[in-house]
Image (cartoon, helix red, strand yellow):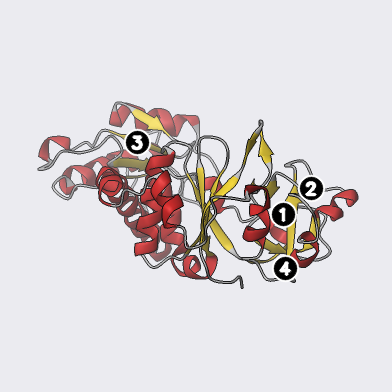
């Protein structure tokens, strides 16, 4: 069986990508094994499509998938042509396509599901921004806790959303990985004895008390999922925060990063059961996927950034964990 079918290869051979481009005319590659293309059956579509409605995968089983149902026959033809061309590049007589295993069928079905979620979510963004609009000033006005003053101490308000015994990392982005960085990992109760913000960044997780490195391997548990967009404006991203709250996710805080973005802190207990769906939906809503990395540092309110103060614009009344 051709090596592309086998598990374990991280990238597609150049010949496979070239073959795919020859059959599908043009492919916008998002990675070495995945890209977007014009649907081979686009003329049969009964509704207007988007640029990313049709996707091709080259790892394991070469597969083209389109969001539209009307092109199913053309997609099946394209898949057979693609697989024959890639799996039998020399055109050997008598070659037959290997039957898909149950695992491969399940993987393809999962990809179809994921693509449907991603594409449908991206298409609702304009409506979501309008229907759930929540501007910066509205967020500040609606905050259950008054955060309009004493901004230098906002970091303490945020830390109190953790448990007092939680070991929280605070520092600069380079303060990780060496023995002296153990000083950047302290219980919340100890951090709160400081007179001012002890660093510009914090991680929204509870670390082991022996940590010297800000890594996922040292995490005891996640306390929050932080949602951010570098694309949506401060008066736009609030709509995503509000929509998430209407999906029963608890918004604990919103931090103005003193840059171009806001950070929404959500209780991870609520997020965990739907984390896989959020991984698909939030990037489709133009939110930064890197914040799904639990140990990713984020801005700490009360600290300065380029002469401006990072601050809270929203804080829930509920006590911490």
On the image, numbered disc 1 is attached to which residue? 215
Say the numbered circle drawn on residue 177: none
Left or right of 62 on screen, residue 188: right
Is 51 on the left or on the right of 320, as rendered? left
**Quarter holding residue 109:** bottom left
- Residue 287 is drawn in which quadrant? top left
Distance from disc 2 to disc 3, alpha carbons, whole Å, reads 38 Å
- SS at badge 4: loop
Q: Which residue is mark 3?
A: 36
CB atoms at circles 1 and 2 under 8 Å apart? yes
Q: Is residue 199 visible?
A: yes
Q: Nearer the viewer, mark 1 or mark 2?
A: 2
Q: Nearer the viewer, mark 3 or mark 4?
A: 4
Image position, residue 162 (x, y; %): 65, 66
Q: For residue 166, which numbered disc appears in the image?
A: 4
Q: Nearer the viewer, residue 89 or 278?
A: 278
Between circles 1 and 4, the one closer to the viewer is 4
Disc on the earlier residue, 4 or 2:
4
Q: Are marks 4 and 2 in contact (CB under 8 Å)?
A: no
Image coords of residue 158 (percent x, y): 62, 59
Tell me how far mark 3 sits from mark 4, CA to CA. 44 Å
**Quadrant of the image occupied by residue 58:** top left
Are the residues tagged 1 and 3 within 8 Å (C-beta)?
A: no
**In this orientation, which residue lies closer to the viewer: 154 or 32?**
154
Q: Which residue is mark 2?
A: 176
Q: Secondary structure at mark 1?
A: loop
- Distance from disc 1 to disc 4, alpha carbons, whole Å, reads 16 Å
């Amino acid at each position: 069986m051709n090596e592309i079918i086998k598990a374990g290869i991280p990238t597609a051979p150049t010949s496979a990508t070239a073959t795919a481009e020859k059959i599908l005319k043009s492919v916008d590659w998002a990675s070495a094994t995945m890209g977007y293309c014009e649907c081979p059956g686009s003329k049969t579509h009964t509704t207007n499509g988007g640029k990313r409605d049709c996707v091709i995968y080259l790892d394991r089983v070469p597969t083209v998938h389109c969001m539209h149902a009307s092109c199913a026959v053309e997609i099946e033809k394209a898949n057979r042509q693609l697989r024959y061309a890639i799996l039998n590049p020399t055109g050997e007589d008598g070659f037959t396509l290997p039957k898909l295993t149950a695992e491969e069928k399940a993987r393809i079905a999962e990809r179809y599901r994921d693509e449907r979620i991603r594409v449908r979510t991206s298409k609702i963004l304009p409506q979501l921004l309008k229907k759930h609009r929540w501007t910066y000033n509205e967020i500040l006005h609606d905050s259950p806790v008054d955060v309009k003053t004493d901004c230098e101490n906002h970091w303490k308000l945020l830390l109190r959303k953790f448990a007092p015994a939680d070991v929280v990392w605070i520092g600069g982005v380079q303060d990780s990985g060496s023995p002296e960085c153990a000083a950047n990992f302290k219980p919340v109760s100890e951090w709160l004895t400081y007179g001012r913000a002890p660093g510009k960044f914090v991680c929204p997780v509870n670390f082991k008390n022996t940590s010297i490195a800000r890594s996922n391997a040292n995490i005891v548990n996640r306390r929050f999922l932080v949602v951010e967009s570098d694309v949506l404006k401060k008066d736009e991203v609030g709509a995503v925060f509000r929509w998430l709250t209407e999906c029963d996710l608890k918004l604990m805080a919103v931090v103005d990063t003193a840059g171009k973005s806001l950070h929404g802190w959500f209780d991870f207990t609520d997020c965990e059961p739907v984390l896989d769906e959020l991984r698909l939906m939030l990037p489709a809503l133009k939110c930064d996927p890197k914040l799904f990395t639990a140990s990713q540092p984020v801005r700490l309110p009360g600290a300065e950034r380029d002469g401006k103060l990072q601050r809270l614009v929203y804080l829930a009344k509920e006590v911490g964990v």
